[in-house]
Amino acid sequence: MLGSIIDILFPPVCPACEKAVRDKGKPLCASCEAGFSAIRIMRPICAVCGEPFISTTSGEHTCGPCLEQTPPFAMARSVYSYAGAALDAIHRFKYSNHLILAPAFADMLLRAVGDMPFPDMDVIVPVPLHAGKLRQRGFNQSLLICRGIAKKLKVDLSYDNLVRAKATLPQVNLKAAERAKNLTGAFALRFAPAFKGKRITIVDDVYTTGATIKECSKVLKKAGAEVYALTLARTVKL
């Protein structure tokens, strides 16, 4: 009864558009969620890196780049195309301090994980920011998302073992090869034995070329971990 009265006086709002939400069980309102393009219903994807294929009839298989050079992660998956409403919401989250979106993003990832062939995870790890970037932004967007996931799955959250050991150039305007070179040696573990034999899921907001996820995965794999990668969105080639 009290909950109904509170909902009438202070109706729940969508964290993306701030309009009233009818279904409290969903992270976003129906209008905003409809603007997020789910990758799993767009096209077949690479069984390893999750890259959507241009052809819609090829079926799921391993892509050429993954066959030529096996990624350091066992599997990577993204939920949405990094375009439209997803891009706008992530930009508001990262660059306009719209932190109310963090629980919604965590819920969206959790709903999607059930349909992904991920094994049970031992540890969840956010992609770290360099200390200077963290001071400038004031928060690590990946860590905020991870907290919601770890809490609901009752999985250990490690946020201070994998660190960004050196500052790098912004990745935004760099090409794929430049991104990979820019991040070489950028990540390190403070105590590598803690991850030996662990099944780790590393989480980030966006997968663009995969350079960040791959560089983090190399460090984790070298420590003896089995690595899986999960991102909210990824750049999809047209």
Image: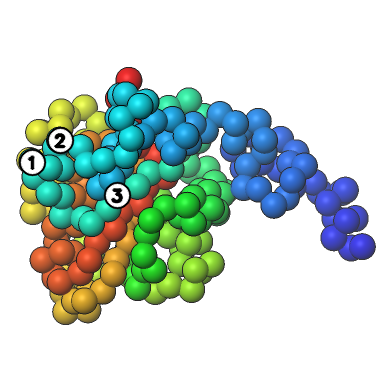
Task: Report the Cα–Cα distance between label 2 and label 1.
Answer: 6 Å
Decide: is 90 above or below 155. Answer: above
Secondary element under disc 2, as helix, strand or loop, is helix
- Disc 1 marks a residue whose amino acid type is Glu
Q: Residues within 10 Å of mark 3 (few under 14, many from 20)?
A: many
Q: Which residue is mark 2?
A: 64
Quarter of the image where the C terminus is located: top left
Seen from the viewer's position, the closer of residues 32 and 13 is: 32
Most distant residue in the top direction:
238
From the viewer's perspective, is the residue at label 1 or at label 3 nearer?
1
Task: Report the Cα–Cα distance between label 1 and label 3.
Answer: 17 Å
> Going 37% across and 26% down the picture, which residue do you hit?
56
Secondary element under disc 3, as helix, strand or loop, is strand
Whether tag 2 and tag 1 are in contact, CB under 8 A, the answer is yes
Q: Is 106 displayed left or right of 53 in the figure?
A: right
> Going 42% across and 60% down the picture, which residue do you hit?
146
Name which quarter of the figure residue 187 lies in: bottom left
Q: Residues within 10 Å of mark 1 (few under 14, many from 20)?
A: few
Q: Which residue is mark 1?
A: 68
Q: Is residue 11 visible?
A: yes
Task: Report the Cα–Cα distance between label 2 and label 3.
Answer: 15 Å
- Disc 3 marks a residue whose amino acid type is Ala
Q: Which residue is mark 3?
A: 76
**x and y, in percent, of residue 163 in the image:** 22, 62
Q: Is 25 displayed left or right of 71 in the figure?
A: right
